[in-house]
Image: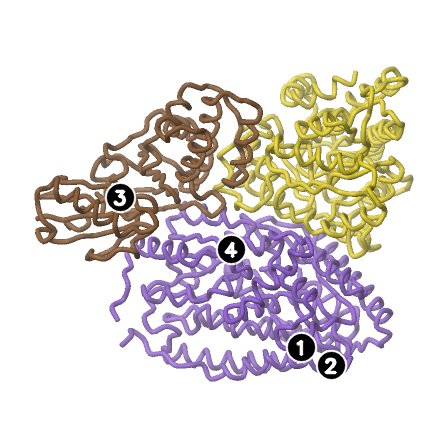
Chain colours: A yellow, B brown, C purple
């Protein structure tokens, strides 16, 4: 059922605690950025779950993180320091941005957790990145083997790849249905689906998604009148209150470019003999976080393509306040969308957003999209 | 020996007169655009209460954000040390002092001898706790005292999360638009400000016993929120809470 | 009369001449239409040295504009505003915003129009660097490439040899590809001999700067940090040139002589401090203000390591100047060998660049090393809103120091954006800090 995604999202810790009790032979690793090579973790019987923020005020991170680091890294660190994720046996990050590095380092310094750092390349377009990253992932695999005391076989890796790829294929299928004039699933429920996939056992979530695709989506309409079709893109975003507000203002979010959305699952692995290269290649080719989109700008044509295929009238570009990676792409992305006649509304998110003032801006934006040109 | 201490704060000027180690007179006056007038008025009140004239004072030490605007003191000292000295004298068991001023918050770690072992002052993004509370009380059309009383009536937990006062204000506006009950909004503001102050205080590692001082710490709503934010069971609130820094200066002058 | 004797540095004039010479060269290249390469200076600047070219480095250029803004705010606020007017967010890297503003305003702080390069080449040393010159190229319409940089981890992490090997090969192979790319976009032949010389000189001059910093362990310190800014800049701007090596040899001799004769940088040195992160270039007077209390900043992880080569010595458990190829008995003969050695140098010995990625445990160890060996009494941490690379780990560093009873002062600011620095509040904080460590102003 579609509602299950929301249940998992809202009760993530309870779900995981129950899951852990049922799966004593598995370990759990918490990660913060969506580049984590989950295939290897599934192969090692280590469940990867993504840490997201709690979207509520906290007062524990200022001694650790400078004031102008992004709210996401602060919120995530707060969750860790407050013990919300104590059921995790380890944490791990891939290198993406320094804000996440800071949250990771502070967790190690103050909670003494087991930890894994994967020195991910940033210039993912470079042909030299593949041999490098495949080698680094092999080291990661060996570290996991030492940690769990179990060898990871080729079959284990194939099983890991199959689970994660299945999740990607299913979510892509759901996203395809949102191309319909009247999409069968809302932007909010789509966000719940992706985040539930990140924060719970994919083997369980895959069953739910497959069931939703087969039994629930056919003939379904998320709303009687979908209103104006919008795209949303930018930094990490699981601000469900904001998404809900936007979709209640006469619009539907039909596509996104978020790491809590399409960027996370867009491509699957491609067949190959060396499985470490297969896995590395998948992450190098995924729609990138802006920090990894260099020297060429591949994000612009990709996002323009999404806007066209999902037929959107406008785009909401959001960034976590102080999120450097997305700030660095701000001008290029806004101009790129303008070039294909997609107007944008740019908003900065904090741990919580002021819904009232944001509603006014969203409504004004929708009005401009809905009105006929005067001349 | 008669000494005096003065705290020329961004909103008020406070003067304390000590006679043989005991407080003989106090004066407080609101400083507007000019601190000088308030300085004179606060002095006049303190001298009157002590029943002495300015010439009877052996030494005056002063502190405060607007100290440069006034003349007529012998030495200056920092707010941090003034708070530490005063609190150590008032209660030697105090290890952490949290001073909530109009424009600045300070967390001070005091060692067993009353010396400052660490301190933190809020950075720009979290500035103006006291001033923000006042602005919000004006927006809610209640006095600052009523604002705290209103907050005490509520047990709701509404998030006001923004670090920056400007963004926090827009969150308050949201709550007003949503017709949130006034006590809940007042409590949300107290909680929000407390979270920011607690964040800063945690930089020096808060160790009991803890004292709250400064003008804004007079508000009962903020007191409750701050105590909860720092998970404290006991907090020491000195009498004459806004005179603490001035008292510290007077003690210094008597050394 | 101070406690120590002091005298001006003899090679001060030479440092000034060399620095201005770099910018004169860029202006000449702009006016004559010869090759200019732009990018960050904290990158592989020996790489384009296989061509006859002038290199325009973004960070020291940003610092120069910030400094020039003291006299003429159009070089500071003005350029920031030009960048913001074009919608670039105001909390991004302040050097980058100055660069964008300068380019958009088409003016160069050393005179004339902004020198648009033949191409931009960047090393991705922090999470902003690779994107910075992508933006510059977007505006300039010139080719852009970058070299990814994944430094070795700190010694605290026991990184495997295989991990290091992968990083070294990754960087070396990218460098080799970039050389081909540069030939293609410039239409010019890359001279291997020039490149190999540049690698040798870069390693040598950065090692020499580290040796200069070692001399500062002397009491009294022979350099204060403000002096260092004028001295390390030669390594920042032109470490791949022979003139830099020669300059640092002369400087090292002079510093050793000063140490032997007990010549101080600051005559009243009583309280030795180090600083963290770049300073607020627009308000360097805060360093002079410290002196009123007998305190002096005698260095920083930043100033020591920005263009310094430091190697960890396991036996002594210390960081010591790294050995340049010749000193290590290595002769670089081919382009491949030079790229390999150069990669190792940048990955292993450029410890500042390492701290931009990895904060916390490793950086704490290096700071403790400086505190112990340079006999430091306290630290001043600039919570730098203009450079998040150096800001990463700062709050944890503060905690680390406080837990060990090492006095530390934090002040918020921005290395280049004067609008984010409050001099009065900073002075207040310094006053409070000095009071808490028992220092009072020295009577004049």
> For the residues marked 3 and 2, what is the alpha-carbon distance in whole angstroms?
63 Å
Mark 1 element type:
loop
Q: Are marks 4 and 1 on the same chain?
A: yes
> Callout 3: helix, strand or loop?
helix
- The residue that mark 4 highlights is C420
The chain identifier of the residue carrying mark 4 reads: C
Which marked residue is nearer to the observer: mark 4 or mark 1?
A: 1
- Say left or right for A301 vs B43: right
Is any part of residue A304 visible from this angle? yes
Inter-mark Cα distance, 2 to 1 = 9 Å
User: Label 3: which residue?
Assistant: B245
Task: Please tell me whether mark 3 or mark 1 is closer to you in this view.
Answer: 1
Q: Which callout, 2 or 1, points to the residue nearer the camera?
A: 1
- What kind of element bears circle 2? helix
Q: Is residue A2 above or below residue C283?
A: above
Q: Which residue is mark 1?
A: C112
**Residue A241 image point, x, y percent:** 66, 27
Up/down of A47 relative to C4, above or below: above
Please report, as a chain letter, where disc 3 is located: B
Q: Nearer the viewer, residue B250 or B28?
A: B28
C-alpha gap between disc 2 and disc 4: 36 Å
Report x, y in % for residue C348.
Answer: 64, 60
Marked residue chain, label 2: C
Number of numbered labels in the structure image: 4
How far apart are labels 4 and 3 at the CA level?
Answer: 29 Å
**Element carrying mark 4:** helix
């Amino acid at each position: 059922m579609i509602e299950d995604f929301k249940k998992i999202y809202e009760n993530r810790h309870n779900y995981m605690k129950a899951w852990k009790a049922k799966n004593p032979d598995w370990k759990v690793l918490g990660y913060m950025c969506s580049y984590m090579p989950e295939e290897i973790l599934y192969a090692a019987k280590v469940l990867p779950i993504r840490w997201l923020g709690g979207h509520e005020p906290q007062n524990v991170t200022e001694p650790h993180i400078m004031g102008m680091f992004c709210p996401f890294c602060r919120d995530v660190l707060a969750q860790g320091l407050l013990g919300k994720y104590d059921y995790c046996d380890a944490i791990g990050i891939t290198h993406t941005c320094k804000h996440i590095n800071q949250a990771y380092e502070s967790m190690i310094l103050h909670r003494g957790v087991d930890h894994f750092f994967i020195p991910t390349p940033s210039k993912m377009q470079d042909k030299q990145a593949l041999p490098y990253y495949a080698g680094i992932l092999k080291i990661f695999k060996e570290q996991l083997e030492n940690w769990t005391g179990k060898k990871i076989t080729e079959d284990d890796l194939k099983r890991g790849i199959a689970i994660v790829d299945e999740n990607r294929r299913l979510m892509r299928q759901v996203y395809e249905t949102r191309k319909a004039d009247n999409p069968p699933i809302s932007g909010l429920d789509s966000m719940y689906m992706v985040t539930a996939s990140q924060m719970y056992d994919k083997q369980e979530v895959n069953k739910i998604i497959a069931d939703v695709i087969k039994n629930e989506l056919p003939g379904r309409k998320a709303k009687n009148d979908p209103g104006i079709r919008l795209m949303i893109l930018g930094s990490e975003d699981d601000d469900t209150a904001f998404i809900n507000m936007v979709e209640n203002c006469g619009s539907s979010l039909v596509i996104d470019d978020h790491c809590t959305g399409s960027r996370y699952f867009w491509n699957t692995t491609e067949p190959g003999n060396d499985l470490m290269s297969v896995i590395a290649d998948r992450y190098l080719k995924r729609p990138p976080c802006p920090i990894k989109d260099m020297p060429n700008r591949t994000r612009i044509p990709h996002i323009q393509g999404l806007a066209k295929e999902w037929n959107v009238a406008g785009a909401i570009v959001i960034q976590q306040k102080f999120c450097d990676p997305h700030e660095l792409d701000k001008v290029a992305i806004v101009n790129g969308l303008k070039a294909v006649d997609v107007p944008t509304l740019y908003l900065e998110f904090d741990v919580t957003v002021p819904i009232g003032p944001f509603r006014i801006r969203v409504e004004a934006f929708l009005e401009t999209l809905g009105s006929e040109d005067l001349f | 020996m008669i000494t005096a201490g003065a705290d020329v704060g961004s909103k008020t000027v406070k003067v304390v007169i000590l006679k043989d180690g005991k407080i003989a007179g106090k004066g407080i006056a609101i400083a507007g655009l000019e601190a000088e007038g308030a300085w004179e008025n606060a002095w006049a009140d303190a001298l009157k209460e002590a029943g002495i004239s300015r010439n009877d004072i052996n030494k005056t030490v002063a502190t405060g954000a607007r100290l440069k605007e006034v003349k007529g003191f012998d030495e200056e000292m920092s707010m941090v040390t003034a708070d530490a000295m005063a609190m150590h004298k008032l209660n030697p068991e105090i290890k952490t002092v949290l001073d909530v001023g109009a424009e600045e918050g300070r967390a001070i770690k005091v060692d067993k001898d009353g010396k400052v072992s660490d301190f933190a002052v809020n950075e720009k993004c979290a500035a103006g706790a006291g001033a923000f509370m006042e602005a919000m009380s004006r927006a809610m059309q209640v006095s600052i005292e009523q604002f705290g009383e209103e907050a005490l009536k509520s047990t709701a937990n509404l998030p006001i999360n923004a670090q920056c006062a400007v963004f926090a204000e827009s969150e308050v506006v949201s709550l007003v638009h949503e017709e949130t009950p006034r006590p809940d909004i007042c409590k949300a503001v107290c909680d929000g400000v407390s979270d920011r102050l607690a964040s800063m205080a945690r930089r020096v590692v808060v160790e009991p016993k803890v004292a709250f001082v400064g003008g804004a710490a007079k508000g009962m709503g903020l007191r409750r929120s701050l105590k909860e934010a720092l998970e404290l069971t006991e907090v020491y609130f000195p009498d004459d809470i806004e005179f603490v820094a001035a008292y510290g200066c007077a003690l210094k002058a008597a050394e | 009369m101070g406690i120590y004797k002091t005298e001006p540095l003899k090679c001060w004039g030479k440092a000034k001449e060399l620095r201005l010479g770099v910018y004169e060269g860029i202006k000449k290249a702009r006016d004559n239409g010869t090759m200019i390469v732009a990018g960050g200076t904290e990158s592989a600047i020996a790489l384009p040295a296989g061509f006859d070219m002038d290199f325009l480095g973004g960070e020291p250029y940003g610092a120069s504009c910030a400094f020039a803004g003291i006299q003429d705010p159009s070089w500071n606020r003005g350029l920031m505003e030009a960048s913001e007017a074009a919608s670039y967010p105001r909390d991004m890297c302040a050097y980058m915003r100055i660069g964008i503003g300068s380019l958009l305003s088409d003016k160069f702080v050393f005179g004339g129009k902004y020198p648009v390069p033949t191409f931009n080449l960047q090393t991705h040393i922090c999470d902003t660097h690779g994107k910075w010159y992508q933006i510059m190229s977007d505006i300039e319409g010139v080719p852009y490439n970058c070299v990814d940089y994944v430094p070795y981890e700190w010694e605290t992490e026991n990184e495997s040899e295989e991990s290091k090997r992968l990083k070294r090969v990754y960087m070396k192979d990218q460098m080799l590809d970039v050389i081909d790319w540069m030939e293609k976009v410039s239409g010019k032949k890359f001279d291997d001999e020039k490149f190999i010389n540049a690698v040798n000189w870069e390693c040598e001059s950065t090692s020499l700067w580290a040796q200069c910093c070692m001399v500062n362990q002397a009491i009294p310190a022979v350099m204060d940090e403000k002096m260092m800014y004028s001295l390390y800049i030669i390594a920042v701007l032109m470490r791949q040139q022979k003139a830099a090596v020669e300059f640092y040899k002369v400087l090292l001799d002079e510093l050793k002589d000063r140490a032997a004769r007990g010549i101080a940088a600051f005559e009243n040195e009583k309280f030795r401090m180090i600083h963290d992160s770049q300073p607020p270039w627009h308000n360097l007077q805060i360093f002079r203000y410290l002196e009123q209390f007998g305190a002096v900043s005698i260095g920083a992880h930043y100033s020591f390591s920005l263009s310094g080569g430091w190697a960890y010595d396991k036996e002594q458990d210390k960081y010591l100047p790294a050995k340049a190829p010749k000193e290590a008995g290595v002769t670089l003969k081919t382009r491949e060998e030079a790229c390999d050695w150069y990669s190792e140098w940048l990955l292993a010995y450029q410890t500042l660049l390492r701290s931009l990625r990895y904060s916390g445990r490793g950086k704490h160890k290096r700071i403790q090393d400086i505190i112990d060996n340079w006999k430091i009494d306290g630290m001043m941490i600039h919570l730098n809103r203009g450079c998040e690379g150096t800001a990463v780990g700062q709050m944890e560093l503060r905690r680390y120091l406080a837990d060990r009873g090492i006095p530390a002062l934090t002040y918020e600011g921005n290395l280049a954006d004067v609008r984010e620095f409050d001099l009065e509040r900073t002075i207040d904080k310094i006053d409070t800090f000095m009071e808490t460590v028992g220092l009072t102003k020295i009577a004049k």
